Image: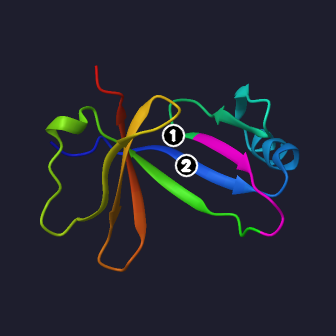
Amino acid sequence: MTTEGIEAMYLETRNWGKAAKFFQALGYELEFATDHNSGMLRNGDGPYLFIAEVPENREPRTQIVFKVPDADAFRAGEIVEVVTPFEETHYGTREMTVRDPDGRTWTLSAPKAV
């Protein structure tokens, strides 16, 4: 089994409000906001954006998330270095981190095991 393409972009920001307004100006609609300066925005059927505010002393990161329909059935190809195997998250998914040949890390996200 392979991925089903890009599911989401996870973006860190130093200012949640300004970041949300920026993406809303680009056509994204706020789907929900949390009570800790983060939230999800969508634009049509494309990948969603999840934006989270981080402290000023931390460099904001960007993370691309690929969709995997079944973590148990997924098999990484030989060229895919698994950094961390699928682990349950606090937000109801299972995530794996992989590294590409250039050293970039990528996130694979699957539904929580039933």
> Pointer 2 and pointer 1: residues touching (CB < 8 Å)?
yes
Q: Is residue 80 above or below residue 64?
A: below
Please tell me which residue is depicted at 45% across the width and 49% down the height of the picture: 65
- Above/below status of 112 relative to 55: above
**Mark 2 burial class by Cα count in 10 Å: few <14, some 14-19, many 20+:** some
Quarter where residue 56 is shown: bottom right
The circle drawn on residue 9 is: 2
How would you rate the neighbour count of disc 1 (Cα within 10 Å): few for under 14, some for 14-19, many for 20 or more?
Answer: some
- Judged from the image, the secondary structure of the residue bearing numbered disc 2 is strand
Q: Amino acid at mark 2?
A: Met
Give the alpha-carbon distance from disc 2 to disc 1, as whole Å. Answer: 7 Å
Q: Which amino acid lies under the numbered mark 1 shown in the image of this protein?
A: Pro
Name the residue rendered at 40%, 60% in the picture: 106
- Residue 17 is marked as none
Residue that mark 1 sits on = 47
Question: Within the magenta stretch, is there residue 76?
Answer: no
Which picture quadrant has residue 49? top right
Colouring method of the image? rainbow
Q: Position of residue 34 (x, y in %)?
A: 74, 30
Q: Is residue 51 magenta?
A: yes
In the image, taking residue 102 as reference, residue 2 lies left or right, namely left
